[in-house]
């Protein structure tokens, strides 16, 4: 006989400079599902635009992504390092727009800022200043974490995901 599972969609949102973190997040979600989820009838499915969106016409790219995966997500993980992302019609980047849409819908956003070393020649100061401005603006709207490595980021996310569902279970 099958089990009834609660299924949650986790949006992974980040600019291209932290794409290697996407696989780390997916690994932590897989581990969560095996260890916590199975025993508590919970399944978390990741949603990332490169994996879960499809070719579609008839709208602006971010609007199409919003309707395909962002608006249906139950919560999100967002990672910034040195790039803010590609501007949209109404926001400084698609990532910023996704954060704002999630927050306006009352959904959980796990927000992380990477502060690992980068060669100065690779740093775009304009993007980095946008990240710092966003970080200052967000500090009054929630809690974020700063990671100095991908390993720390993955562990922060693992712990936050577990705490989120423990709190959810208590309600």
Image (cartoon, rainbow, N blue to C red):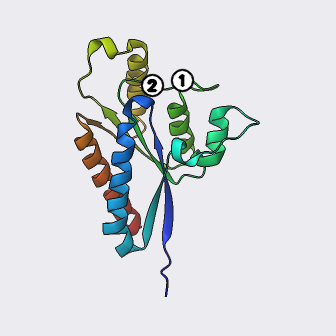
Residue on which the image places disc 2: 84
- The one nearer the camera, 112 or 118, is 118
Asked which quadrant contains residue 39, the reply is bottom left
Quarter of the image for residue 32 reads bottom left
Tell me if 50 is positioned left or right of 124 in this view. right
Question: Relative to residue 81, is residue 102 drawn left or right?
Answer: right
CA separation in Å, label 1 and label 2 = 8 Å
Residue 171: where, in percent of width, then height?
42, 67
Query: Which residue sits furthest bottom?
Result: 1
Find numbered disc 2 in the image and state the secondary structure of the residue it sits on: loop
Percent position of residue 143, x then y: 35, 41
Q: Position of residue 75 (x, y in %)?
A: 48, 51
Indicate left or right for 76 with 154 as reference: right
Mark 1: which secondary structure? loop
Q: Can residue 139 be seen in this view?
A: no
Q: Residues within 10 Å of mark 2 (few under 14, many from 20)?
A: many
Q: Residue 154 or 141: which is nearer the viewer?
A: 154
Which of the two labelled residues, at mark 1 and mark 2, occupies the earlier sequence position?
2
Q: Which residue is drawn at 50% across and 33% down?
A: 95
At 34% from the left edge and 16% from the top edge, which residue is drawn? 123
Which residue corresponds to mark 1? 92
* Residue occupying image coordinates x 73% and y 34%: 59
Q: Do the residues labelled 1 and 2 touch (CB within 8 Å)?
A: yes
Q: Where is residue 99 in the image (x, y as percent from the top left)?
A: 50, 38
Vertical relation: 44 (above or below) 120: below
Confirm whether residue 149 shows in the render: yes
Give the number of the disc on residue 6. Answer: none
Q: In this view, does 22 lie above or below 44?
A: above
Above or below for 85 versus 50:
above
């Amino acid at each position: 006989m099958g089990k009834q599972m609660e299924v949650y969609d986790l949006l992974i949102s980040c600019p291209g400079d932290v794409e290697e973190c996407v696989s780390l997040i997916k690994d932590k979600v897989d581990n969560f599902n095996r260890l916590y989820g199975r025993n508590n009838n919970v399944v978390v499915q990741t949603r990332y635009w490169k994996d879960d969106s499809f070719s579609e016409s008839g709208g602006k790219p971010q609007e199409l992504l919003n309707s395909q995966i962002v608006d249906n997500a139950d919560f999100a993980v967002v990672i910034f390092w040195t790039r803010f992302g590609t501007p949209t019609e109404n926001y400084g980047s698609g990532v910023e727009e996704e954060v704002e849409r999630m927050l306006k819908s009352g959904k959980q956003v796990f927000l992380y800022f990477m502060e690992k070393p980068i060669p100065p020649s690779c740093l775009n100061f304009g993007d980095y200043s946008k990240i710092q401005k966003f970080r200052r603006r967000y500090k009054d709207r929630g809690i974020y974490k700063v990671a100095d490595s991908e390993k720390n980021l993955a562990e922060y996310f693992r712990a936050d995901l577990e705490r989120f569902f423990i709190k959810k279970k208590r309600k």
